[in-house]
Image (tube, helix red, strand yellow):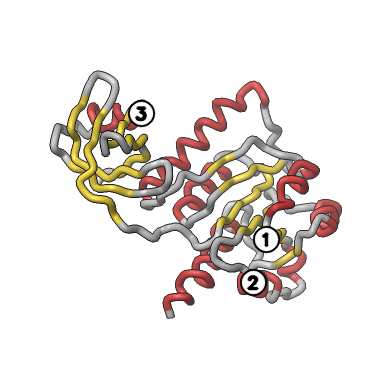
Amino acid sequence: MQRYFATFSPENNCFFITGEDYHHISKVMRMKEKDEIICVSENQKTALCSIAEISTDQVTADVIQWMEESVELPVTVTIVSGLPKGDKFEWIIQKGTELGASKFIPFTADRSVVKWDGKKADKKLMRWQKIAKEAAEQSHRTIIPEITQPVDLPSLLKYAEGYDVKLVAYEEEARLGEDKVLVSHLKELEKGGSLLIVFGPEGGLTSGEVERLSAGGFRACGLGPRILRTETAPLYLLSAVSYHLELLEVN
């Protein structure tokens, strides 16, 4: 069943759907009145709905039944990625959204080959947000992850001050066989807590960047004995968070 993030009207007990989602319902899916869809409100509530009206620019969907869902990670995870080449950041956003990330922050690292083009910034950010929205709908998320403008290292250090756990994935730690930092910090996280982790671009983070992050309260950690690509490492981390805080909790 099709799922849409939409505007909920408490007074009318219905959702209003506009823009691209309106076009998708009316022109692509060619839905009709009384067809059923799933809508997600701004406060992360999910409802089974019936289409009541399709006008020239808006779909109105009446709530049939509110649904109980528990699909979000028990902690908020922010992924900071050194700007990679090509469409790798789009891959990180899409797959990271499916795995439960709450926010993505592109980072202009020393070894980032890609240079941020301010003239194309709005268009690029809109594309990233669209990818996150579509991935959130596909994976039945109740939130669309936030994606920020790229930040430099000083801005990142200031931004990270409010997080419970701050980590930096550093390949030198993996080469040295470090395997305790990530596990110990995941064990420290409580439900409702927050984790921010920094990943380098293709060339990795410099020792100077890691030193500055460490001075700002970050802990360097390895991600197992293998060296992962810049687009693979965030997915490893999110899978580890899910295992420790969701799957183990079930048992």
For the residues labelled 1 and 3, the Cα–Cα distance comes to 37 Å
State which mark lies toward you, 2 or 3: 2
Query: In terms of depth relative to the viewer, which is nearer, 47 or 208?
Result: 47
Position above or below: 149 against 168: above
Question: Decide: marks 1, 3 in contact (CB < 8 A)?
Answer: no
Give me the residue at 29% from left, 27% from top: 23
List the residue tagged with mark 2: 188
Q: Name the residue furthest bottom.
A: 251
For the residues labelled 2 and 1, the Cα–Cα distance comes to 9 Å
Q: Is residue 111 visible?
A: no
Q: Residues within 10 Å of mark 2 (few under 14, many from 20)?
A: few
Which residue type does callout 3 highlight? Glu
Question: Decide: marks 2, 1 in contact (CB < 8 A)?
Answer: yes
Q: Residues within 10 Å of mark 1 (few under 14, many from 20)?
A: some
Q: Residues within 10 Å of mark 3 (few under 14, many from 20)?
A: few
Q: Is residue 56 left or right of residue 114?
A: left
Q: Earlier in the sequence, mark 2 or mark 1?
A: 1
For the residues labelled 2 and 3, the Cα–Cα distance comes to 42 Å
Q: Is residue 41 left or right of residue 189?
A: left
Check disc 2 and report its element: helix, strand or loop: helix
Give me the residue at 24% from left, 31% from top: 60
Query: In terms of depth relative to the viewer, which is nearer, 77 or 69?
Result: 69
List the residue tagged with mark 1: 164
Q: Earlier in the sequence, mark 1 or mark 3?
A: 3
Q: Which mark is residue 156?
A: none
Q: Name the residue furthest front.
A: 11
Q: Name the residue furthest top.
A: 56
